[in-house]
Amino acid sequence: MIKTDVLIIGAGPVGLFTVQQLGLIGLKAEVVDNLDKIGGQCIELYPDKPIYDIPALPECTGESLTKNLLEQIKPFKTNFHLNERVQEISKEKNNWKIKTSKDKIFIAPNIIIAGGVGSFEPRKFLIKEAEKFENNGIYYSVKDKNYFKNKKVCIFGGGDSALDWAIELSKFAEVTLVHRRNEFRGAEHSSETAKKFEKEGKLKIKTPFQIISIEGEDKIKAITIKDEDGKTEKITTDCVLGFFGLIMKLGPIVEWGLNLEKKHIPVNTENFQTNKEGIFAIGDICTYPGKLKLILSGFHEGALAARGCFKLARPNEKYRFEFTTTSKSVHERLGVKKVD
């Protein structure tokens, strides 16, 4: 059994920044995430894609943003519970009892849901052979781009992820981009870059084609694709990447008695609490008038939710707002010397 001030569901940028905001006011957080890595959608979908709307950072990537947020919360020695989903919650006096898919039990007066639009998983290839090679030749995300160096790679999809990775991996791998339509639906600039690379011989593009079979025993040797007229083509390849978007699932959250509104959770904008005392929602999953689905908006929501948690975690103490520039207690929590 793990006791904490706050259990955060979701280890994306908003969840990470909220850990820092909680730590500044002396609250301890544990973080649970359904993914196998820290960083949420930023890491899962676009680790190398530039982000331009983070304050004071003219440009950063999902990977660098996650790295910096983790550096920022180092003083608070946060525990992360990955590959784990919150299954059940129940109220016990003034605390929530939270049980996960790995049978861990957390006791906390506060829960902050920062899980994007619920947990998510990639849409997968429909052909039966695909499951046999999953994570051994067939992948739905890129964890380490260097793994694909000097390999033959087939990428399927027509959105931003497919285009971005086709362009990136073509710098050091033999890449074929396959899409079931002639036109791509990703950013115009990325589409133009991919077509430019094709003309320069850096990238092969096959449209409109779909995969119909995979060959191989212990590893993939080749795939066969088919166009709209039934014409087939065999491609030798080492790896296949599929980027068909994500299936969003709220999962067990739907059974928690929250007032859901089209798969989103309504909150008040004073402290981002839901209709359940001690349960807060921030980031893409929450909704309120004027909501903007931006990372920077999530940071604001996390800051206010953290202060809302203080009341329930420290019922006998009065919350006192302090500036980080002058607060002795904040400096002690951060482990820095006070600046005169």
Image (cartoon, grey):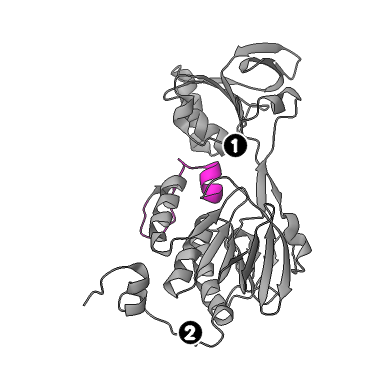
Element type where label 2 sits in the image: loop
* Residue drawn at the location 67% of the way across and 77% of the way down: 277
Q: Residue furthest left?
A: 340
* Disc on res. 319: 2
Instruction: Say few, some or many: other residues with alpha carbon within 10 Å of mark 1 (under 14 / 14 to 19 / 20 or more).
Output: some
Q: Nearer the viewer, residue 222 or 35?
A: 35
Instruction: Say few, some or many: other residues with alpha carbon within 10 Å of mark 2 (under 14 / 14 to 19 / 20 or more).
Output: few
**What's the magenta bit mostly, secondary-structure-wise?**
loop
Quadrant in the picture for residue 185: top right
Q: Which residues are magenta?
A: 39-58
The answer to if 46 sits in the magenta stretch is yes
From where the camera sits, is residue 262 visible? no
Of the two numbered discs 1 and 2 on the same chain, state the one appearing first in sequence.
1
Relative horizontal placement of residue 224, taking residue 141 as reference (left or right): right
Q: Residue 51 location, x and y as percent?
A: 45, 49
Q: Which residue is mark 1?
A: 159
Under mark 2, the amino acid is Tyr
From where the camera sits, is residue 118 visible? yes
Q: Nearer the viewer, residue 340 or 116?
A: 340
Quarter of the image that includes the C terminus: bottom left
Under mark 1, the amino acid is Gly
